Image (cartoon, rainbow, N blue to C red):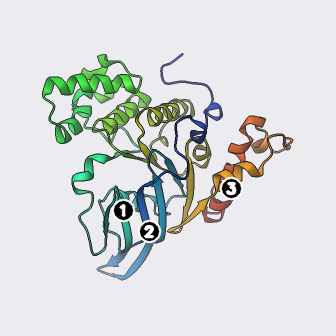
Amino acid sequence: MHPDTVPALPAAPSASSVAGTPGNDAPPLLELRGVTRSYRTGGWFAPRQERQVLRGVDLTVREGGCTGVVGPSGAGKSTLCRIALGLERPDGGMVRFMGRTWGRDVHHGLGKDRRHVQVVFQNSVNAVNPRMTVERIIGEPLENFTTLNRRQRRARAGELLEQVHLSPTLLDRLPHRLSGGQLQRVCIARALAPRPRLILLDEALSSLDMLVQARVLDLLTELRRATGTAYLFVTHDVRLVPLFCDEAAVLTEGRVAPVDMHASAQARAPQAPHRGDARHAVPHQAAPHQAVYDALHAAILPALPASAPR
């Protein structure tokens, strides 16, 4: 079997069922309260207009937890990510991370807490320098946030590769000599390097095929259990959220609507008979996942363009 392939995605366990993961009573790590953000468009020969991208967004990521944010293109997911990373200042509301608060009038961003928030992007090829070896890619945050010397950084990079199920023999390879799944795991290893409290997964699985997605999803769940790192999982792929997240919210037209995953999962009895529709022909043990999927799908459906597949 190819190293990037695993059984089909629906067999992956729900993150909320993984032993050692926190419940909804875990303390908040990242909080967004009433966050608004707008941009001015037009200029020169076009009239200037203000486009509101985020409208009073409330969102919480708990210590060691995983919160999913699902929404269509143009919903404001990228803006939400930049504000959560401290790269943009909200027009209104506040952001609190590890007890540190910022907003429109108080903006110091993450500051010294920068090492505690890392990100894995959608396109792993564009996220790395093609001239850097794997050792240098993983070693960058170690050089920036630790006092390790070069030999120690190489040893730590090898340990991180093993942690994401890659061989340390890849340390001297360039990105073009890795598969898509391998390179994405290198990016995950880089994110883990400074031992962050939170990793933002910005469409991190979207560019991978389903089999590689399943393997990376399994890996992220395993790493979360081992390290206690929390995830903010931003995606347009509704089917991944109930497999991976403890909490979820739908972002449409700049507004966030929370989805009660526990209530949705309980609403469908495990013995519910299969329907004729292929979308409902799921095994009994997958019924809670299907119920959450249905709730997410119902929330996001009105925001999809008429031409989009439903």
Q: Secondary structure under badge 1?
A: strand
User: Which of label 2 and label 3 is nearer to you?
Assistant: 2
Q: Are marks 1 and 3 in contact (CB under 8 Å)?
A: no
Return the mark for residue 96.
Answer: 1
Q: Looking at the image, which residue is at 25% across and 33% down?
A: 137
Q: Amino acid at mark 1?
A: Arg
Give the CA distance from mark 2 to mark 3. 24 Å
Q: Quadrant of the N terminus?
A: top right
Q: Residues within 10 Å of mark 1 (few under 14, many from 20)?
A: some
Q: Amino acid at mark 3?
A: Ala
First in residue order: circle 2 vs circle 3: 2
Q: Is residue 96 visible?
A: yes
Give the CA distance from mark 1 to mark 3. 29 Å
Q: Are marks 1 and 2 in contact (CB under 8 Å)?
A: yes
Q: Amino acid at mark 2?
A: Arg
Residue 150, percent from left and from top:
14, 27
Q: Looking at the image, which residue is at 71% across and 48% down?
A: 265
Q: Looking at the image, which residue is at 29% across and 80% down?
A: 44
Q: Secondary structure under badge 2?
A: strand
Q: Which residue is mark 2?
A: 33
Q: Residues within 10 Å of mark 3 (few under 14, many from 20)?
A: some
Give the CA distance from mark 1 to mark 2. 8 Å
First in residue order: circle 1 vs circle 2: 2
Q: Which residue is mark 3?
A: 295
Residue 288, percent from left and from top:
71, 44
